[in-house]
Image (cartoon, rainbow, N blue to C red):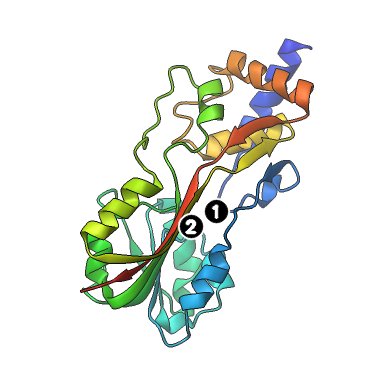
Amino acid sequence: MNINALKKEWLKYEEEVNFEGWDFSHIKDDWENETLPWDFTRIINKYLSSNLELLDMGTGGGEFLLSLNHPYEKTSVTEGWQPNIELLKRKLVPLGIKLASIADDDIIDFVDNSFDIIINRHESFHVNEIKRVLRPNGVFITQQVGGENGNRLSNMLIPNFQPQYRNLNLRNTLCDLKKRDFEIMFADEYFPYQKFFNMKALIYYVKVIEWEFPAFNVKENFDRLLNAYKELTANGYVLNYEHRFIIVAYNHK
């Protein structure tokens, strides 16, 4: 193992990271994510019809939203990351899709009772805001990244790592929704494995998911990257675990 050569190579990987939207196709052959036991798209399509007003919260680059083929004039999105907002202005707004930025307070910039269905994949939300903008008997479908997501890899790479969202899980989220008179139609939770088959993919992922790997950089975290590299050479991959849960709920007003 040539330490200096590895460091030079990994620093180059770090410099090459350029992320837009929510598209990991750049590393699609270099990692593996276990399939979830539910199909998010199929669940949405069970409730979605072309006459409904749809809101997609935290749409990212809009890739998933567009795959639903919902009428543009009945579609709205929120997004909080400025580079994605600029992308959506070029990509979605010209189609007639309405865009609202959203900040850390999770205030949804639409009037009361605007939507028949709200979908939310991996975006934070405030139950009171969902209640406000969702019409009576409207449907809220959310798939969330739980507070235990990626902790194995974060602890491996980040000294004294402290998860930001340790209380984010299915039980607590169901409790919050039920307190606001949501009827739970479906709920599940799962911890799928995640495997990285080379260091380039791992470094790319760690740099993009910066909230799980705070202040990470190759130079300062090099010794810990070596630990990951040893696991990679021994097993053929670096193992991580994700945390996902899903909820479908009716809004009773």
Residue visible at 55% across and 53% down in the picture: 22
Kind of residue at disc 2: Gly
Using the rendered view, name the quadrant where residue 30 is placed.
top right
Using the rendered view, name the quadrant where residue 147 is placed.
top left
Q: Is residue 228 left or right of residue 220?
A: right
Residue visible at 70% across and 33% down in the picture: 200
Q: Is residue 108 visible?
A: no
Q: Which residue lies under the disc numbered 1?
A: 22
Identify the mark at residue 144; answer none if there is no mark: none
Q: Position of residue 181 (x, y in %)?
A: 23, 65
Q: Nearer the viewer, residue 121 or 139?
A: 139
Q: Is residue 32 left or right of residue 92?
A: right
Q: Which residue lies under the disc numbered 2?
A: 60
Q: Nearer the viewer, residue 61 or 193?
A: 193
Helix or strand or loop: what does disc 2 sit on? loop
Residue visible at 47% across and 64% down in the picture: 88
Residue visible at 56% across and 67% down in the picture: 41
Q: CA distance from mark 1 to mark 2?
A: 5 Å
In contact (CB < 8 Å): disc 1 and disc 2: yes
Q: Is residue 193 left or right of residue 81?
A: right
Q: Residues within 10 Å of mark 2 (few under 14, many from 20)?
A: many
Viewport quadrant of the C terminus: bottom left
Q: Nearer the viewer, residue 99 or 176?
A: 176
Q: Nearer the viewer, residue 170 or 141?
A: 170
Q: Position of residue 131 (x, y in %)?
A: 24, 66
Q: Position of residue 66 (x, y in %)?
A: 55, 71
* Marked residue nearer the N-terminal end (1 or 2): 1
